Amino acid sequence: MYKKVVLDNGVRVVLERMSSLKSVALGVWATVGSRNEGKGEGGVSHFIEHMMFKGTPKRTAFQISNEIDALGGEMNAFTTHEATAFYVKVLDQQMGSAFDLLADLFHHSRFSSKDIAKEKQIVLEEIRTVQDDPEDYIHELHARDIFGSHPLGRPILGEPRSMKRLSRQLLMQYRQQHYRPEHTIVAVAGNFSFPEIIDTVNAYFGQWKRSENGKVPPTIRETPWPDQPQERQSLHAKPLEQVHVCVGFKGLPVGHPDRYAAHVLTTILGGGVSSRLFQEIREKRGLAYTIYSHLSSFLDGGTLTVYAATRPNEVAAVIDRICQETNKLCRRDVVSKELERTKTQLKGSLMLGLEGTYGRMNKLAKDELYQGRHVTLHEIVKAIDRITPEQIRQLSRKLFNLKQFVVTALGPIPKKGIPMWGEI
């Protein structure tokens, strides 16, 4: 059972009661992410996420860790381009204690200068971890190639040089500007009483003052979408065993009418072991061990990316096969059997991902963030079932422009470079 309440100060509370379970997932989402960051602020959203766990006047960092373990639950946080989320998952009888802990971190974290200096080193190690993992790093490089200087092109973690600029003053100013009740979503899923949870949320978040004079900080909807990239190929030489490749096409925003068709299309192309790319590139030709496609969707646009890792002398062949498979989707309708299998695969994955309270809490918050309403599972399933072969072909023609896609490659790049579509 779903319920939405908006507190007097603008905090949105979205709730889903799951009485058959014995756990509760609590999430506090700030609708601010890396794309809100201005010049000299790279990585500040993610850094604030880290600092929230470093102690409050009521609890030390050790006491925070000790308390969540004593509750038998789990607590964590994450930062995306468009949101920062803090969550706790506990048994239902521990909900009150968990809420007290989560609210304390969200409202009262100290941000001491000593902790900031230490945490900079930790985040620098996190950045190095990404740079040491080619599959992670290639996606970071690819985003930069597609979006350029736009905030979406910057790494969420920031960069080593941007860490040096993060002062306590900058962090507190950014937090005060963007962490506002009007930009906060509290999402709760699990076994609870509606009156009790609403009273609890109101007690911890209801006294938070709205922005003065009704002035609300600029939202991410006002950030201009980047222009078409000028460079179609970006090669990054690194002594690795394989060349890691991303091939990027235009995607769709989160709320686009064709969003479910885009997920079906991406699944047909490279979403699983039965997908066209997996069968054609790995199973039939042995050109790659890992090959997949995925969507990245934002409020105002998106990308569709294919990733593969292969031998240096096979890079051109892999890219050529990717282009051939996308071209086939533009020219011919998918057969009914393939489409129905993909629909079943997508619906099954969706249902399995929403069996637990954490998955439901995430969906509640994202629905509110991106749609402004609750999207039921019945609605999603019906939308997937309505997708036709013609719709997939028309969408393919819209997205797969073989004259504008962007290639990013990382590894032992062949000396002759990488031929683009139609050049081999």
Image (cartoon, rainbow, N blue to C red):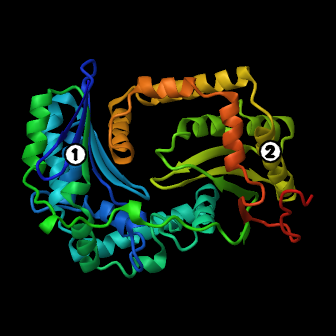
User: Which one is in front, 146 or 165?
Assistant: 146
Determine whether label 1 and label 2 are within 8 Å by CB: no
Say left or right for 156 vs 373: right
Front one among 127 and 273: 273
Q: Where residue 327 is drawn, which disc sits there?
A: 2
Q: Is residue 417 above or below residue 202?
A: below
The Cα–Cα distance between marks 1 and 2, rounded to whole angstroms, is 44 Å
Residue 212, x across and y down, in percent: 13, 67
The amino acid type found where label 2 is placed reads Asn
Residue at 83% of width from left, 59% of height from top? Answer: 312
Answer left or right for 340 relative to 386: right
Q: Residues within 10 Å of mark 2 (few under 14, many from 20)?
A: some
The outermost residue toward the right is 424
The kind of residue tagged 1 is: Arg
362 with respect to 89 (left or right)? right
State the image quarter where residue 405 is shown: bottom right
The residue where tag 1 is placed is 12
66 vs 150: above or below: above
Q: Earlier in the sequence, mark 1 or mark 2?
A: 1
SS category of the residue bearing label 1? strand
Location of residue 278 (image quadrant): top right
Q: Which residue is found at the position 12% from the left and 36% from the top?
A: 198
